[in-house]
Image (spheres, grey):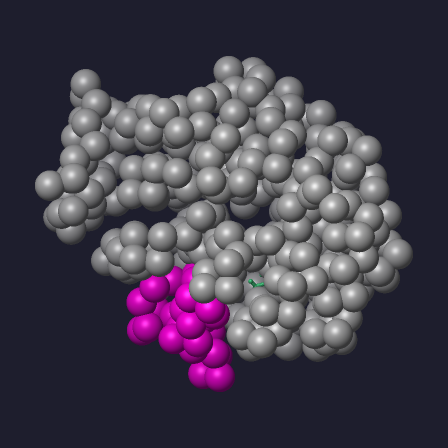
Amino acid sequence: MQEVLTAEASVDIDSDDALLHSITTEAPHEAAALFAAARKVRERHYGKDVYFRGLIEFTNYCKNDCYYCGIRRSNGKAERYRLSLKEILDCCRAGDALGYKTFVLQGGEDPWFTDKRIVELVTAVRGEFPEHAITLSIGERSRKSYEAFFHAGANRYLLRHETACEEHYAKLHPPEMSLAERKQCLYDLKEIGYQVGAGFMVGSPFQKPEHLLEDLRFLRELQPQMVGIGPFIPQKDTPFGAYPAGALNLTLRMLALVRLLLPQALIPATTALGTISPDGREQGLMAGANVVMPNLSPRETRKLYALYDNKICTGDEAAECRYCMEGRIRRFGFTPAMCRGDASGR
Ligand code: SAH
């Protein structure tokens, strides 16, 4: 039996009942004990370090139609943009000058960015920044495409599975999208040699505690190096525009449970967490997260990468985000770490 013990709490991570109890409990002392246990595990592997990743949202065109997402193709109200290679490189340069050693290139599934163009982009960033980590987050592609990006110099890939339950997946996505394919992408990416990030939204419409348990089970099987967890937040021009946002406390408990299940995982305190609560990201760190992803996108386009409403930090310059995050982290007793922060440990 694999048990994670603290003075106040023990969670048997092999037991579905125990996990479901932690997922559903509203008892403040139980949550506090869970967060303390998660912090302890995080500290054992990563100390007080919080890794910085510079996020560049380089296109909001998307061919997919996920019901929850503000940049879905059917959202005619979304004003579309696409950064040029030069603009993306300028973001990287600004990030490098601020000390970032990881660039996360994220976007909708934009067909304009053919494999050839992504390879060109990755090659250019790799050429100018030979030591940096390059993370891609551009959705589902073929194994061959993933291989080409890897050989061009990409090291990491973020692709949240969104929910590990088939039935639930079908309620969040149009029929042409499939969980099996998304999972296959994750296994392919891992096999190719990427450090892989999976993850899910908390409180998405129709989600039940059993779905969250399935998410934990799937993560344990996949063993990703990174896990992105954030609350669902409605975007008014989507089919889910009238649904409530995911709860802060449930999100924090899920984050803590993932830390216990995958002690070495790199787990971001997400922008979505900071959007539902002013100190959501700090609370995320206190529940076991150890990564932050401040924005490096040009200020003019930030508001347009509107996955959900009221997204924070859309008016700030890259430097403001960098130093704001640093202050927040230090106030909570953590140490900003500008190194690459690879999954293999420190
Ligand atoms: N196209 C890429 C990047 C998607 S955006 C991909 O498919 O992986 C990154 C993440 O934002 C998504 O994986 C999703 O989990 C999250 N997201 C999208 N809409 C959201 C919403 N309304 N609330 C909270 N998170 C959302």
Query: On the rendered image, what quadrant is the N terminus found in?
Result: top left
Q: Residue at x 53, y 74 (%)?
A: 143
Q: Would residue 99 be found to the left or right of residue 30 on screen?
A: right
The quarter of the displayed image where residue 287 is located = top left
Quick one: 331 or 245, which is closer to the camera?
331
Q: Is residue 180 magenta?
A: yes
Quick one: 342 or 227, which is closer to the camera?
342
Above or below, comparing residue 150 to residue 266 in the picture: below
Q: Does residue 128 appear in this view? A: yes
Q: Residue at x 72, y 50 (%)?
A: 56
Task: Tell me how many marks there are.
Answer: 0
Q: Does residue 70 appear in this view? A: no
Quick one: 110 or 130, which is closer to the camera?
130
* Residue that protrudes farthest toward the right in the picture: 86
Q: Where residue 256 sits: x, y (%)?
A: 34, 37
Q: Where residue 51 sits: x, y (%)?
A: 57, 33
> What kind of secondary structure does the magenta stretch mostly adopt?
helix
Assign ligand 1 to one image quadrant: bottom right
Query: In this picture, which residue range is highlighted in magenta?
Result: 161-188
Q: Residue at x 61, y 73 (%)?
A: 145
Q: Residue at x 30, y 52 (%)?
A: 220
Q: Is residue 62 magenta?
A: no
Q: Where residue 28 sits: x, y (%)?
A: 27, 28
